[in-house]
Image (cartoon, grey):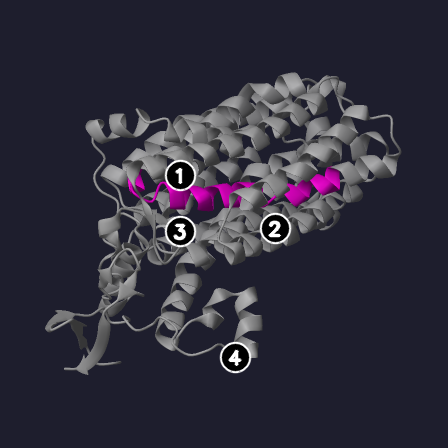
Amino acid sequence: MASDTLSVQESGPETKVVAASPYQFAKRNRPLTRRQRVLGVIWDVFKKEPEERRYVLRLDFFLFAYSLLSYIVKILDQSNISNAYVSGMKEDLKLYGQERNLFNTFFNMGYLVGSVPCQIVMNRSVRPSLWIPSCELVWAALVMCIAACKSARPIYGLRFVIGLAESAAFPGFNLILGSWYTPEELGKRMALFEMSAQAANMFSGYIQTGVYSSMNGRYGIAGWRWLFIIDGIISIPVATAGYFAIPDFPTTTRARWLSTRDRDYSVRRMEAVGRKPPKKLTVREFVRIFSSPRPYLFLLPYNISGFGSYTSYFNLWLKAVGYSVQKVNLIPTAGNGIGLVAAYVGANLSDLTGVRWPWMIVSVVPILVGAIMLSVWDIPASAIIAANFIANIGTPLQPLAIAWSAEVFQDSAATRGLVLGFGNTISYTMSAWLPLLMFPSQDAPHYKYGYQLSAAFQAAAIVGILIFLLFTKWEQKKLGLVKNDYGLMVRPDELDDRLGVVEVNRDEKTATVVKEIEV
């Protein structure tokens, strides 16, 4: 382990000695090799100095890898109802009405009830490292209970409580990831986090196909029932690992896999970015947050595109035109694969350019095009398949919006968490009833107004992105904010003490001479 250091800071005739961060000199001071530049495009740690590289890799191995795995499990447990429905569940339980949509409606109702309270709990009383894994254990057990249901009614209740438990995961992980990673690291990781949902949807199709082929009728249990049992069994060990892997926040962490030096550096790193640590949420702070127009203007582009999501109805069209059960489950996974690639490329472009909003607009456009094509409907079957596939190119939209929120709301950890919590509450509130109007089961696979409304929502999302951008720029100018080394807007006094380097000329942003002394 490297020895502790002190920094001698010389400013004109005056020299003073101050404590340094353990990794104060992690900023790259040597030119990148060609190999580092190439690998750095793929993953940013290759561009970092050895000390910081080891630190970020440790975050990736424990926090980020667990976030991905846990979210994959969440999506599996959330979306398996759709695969089960087209794999025998509909016929076995005689579900010939709106039951499929109601399963999602009750899940969404539970999710929206829990989203904001879960954020308040993690900001006020219970550590995320205890709350999120405990919620995951609850929903894993309830998912397995669906396999024993003989009718739709008990499934409604189970789906409500599963949604309530799962509401802790998505906004919780987004808040935690945004509290540990810098802007140049966050975009691609948020995209990969979102891509894990696409991967889960792919795995769900593969799992259901495998289960249906090999387990259908085993021990007298239908294949669709085995899907819930297997998904629940997968979830339990993943949930248990969360008690160890989730580090809470830099200022409150007790993670055993972080050394004392790592914990000190974590705090200083976020201070350098300008990202404020979490503090206890009070009623006064809550009122202050939501008396500003900022959260509401952000929620417009964050939510409205999702109101018109339509790719989950693709399998109903496939089944209606005569594809086998295996193909109904497998073909949509190609769209998930497109989404994986699009999310990674879009996030890398946003990290390289240092801006989020242009790539968010680029993400909305293919969803809009697909909705317009499906609105016409009287097109070849290949065009209908293409329209559903190209919508997946819009996958980067949500992770880029979340990364943007971590940056524009970096002055308040409570705002970051609550905005995402409210955003998910709005999303699931709308999802509880809007699909019943846009995509009624009895009209499948050709819906009267669903795709037309979806196109309108996508156009509104583009307008919302531009409105929030203009408001943010106006507010930053009004508050006199300046850009720091990470491209984020902070108060002028926050330009000081960036990883121990003091600015002596804020206008020109010139640093003092820093020398390292071994002690």
Alpha-carbon span between mark 2 and mark 1: 20 Å
Q: How crowded is mark 2: few (under 14 residues within 10 Å), some or many (20 or more)?
A: many
Question: Which numbered disc flags the more N-terminal residue, 2 or 3?
Answer: 3
Q: Is residue 393 magenta?
A: yes
Where does label 3 land, which residue?
Answer: 177
Question: Which numbered disc flags the more N-terminal residue, 1 or 4?
Answer: 4
Which mark lies nearer to you, 2 or 4?
Answer: 4
Where does label 4 land, which residue?
Answer: 33
Relative image position of residue 389 (x, y in whole percent): 74, 42
Cβ–Cβ under 8 Å for marks 2 and 1: no
Residue 272 against residue 36 in the figure, above or below: above
Alpha-carbon span between mark 1 and mark 3: 14 Å
Relative image position of residue 51 (x, y in whole percent): 35, 74
Which mark lies nearer to you, 3 or 4?
Answer: 4
Q: What residue type is labelled 2?
A: Ala
Where does label 1 land, which residue?
Answer: 168
Question: Which quadrant of the view contains residue 205?
Answer: top right
Question: Which numbered disc flags the more N-terminal residue, 2 or 1?
Answer: 1
What range is drawn magenta here? 388-414
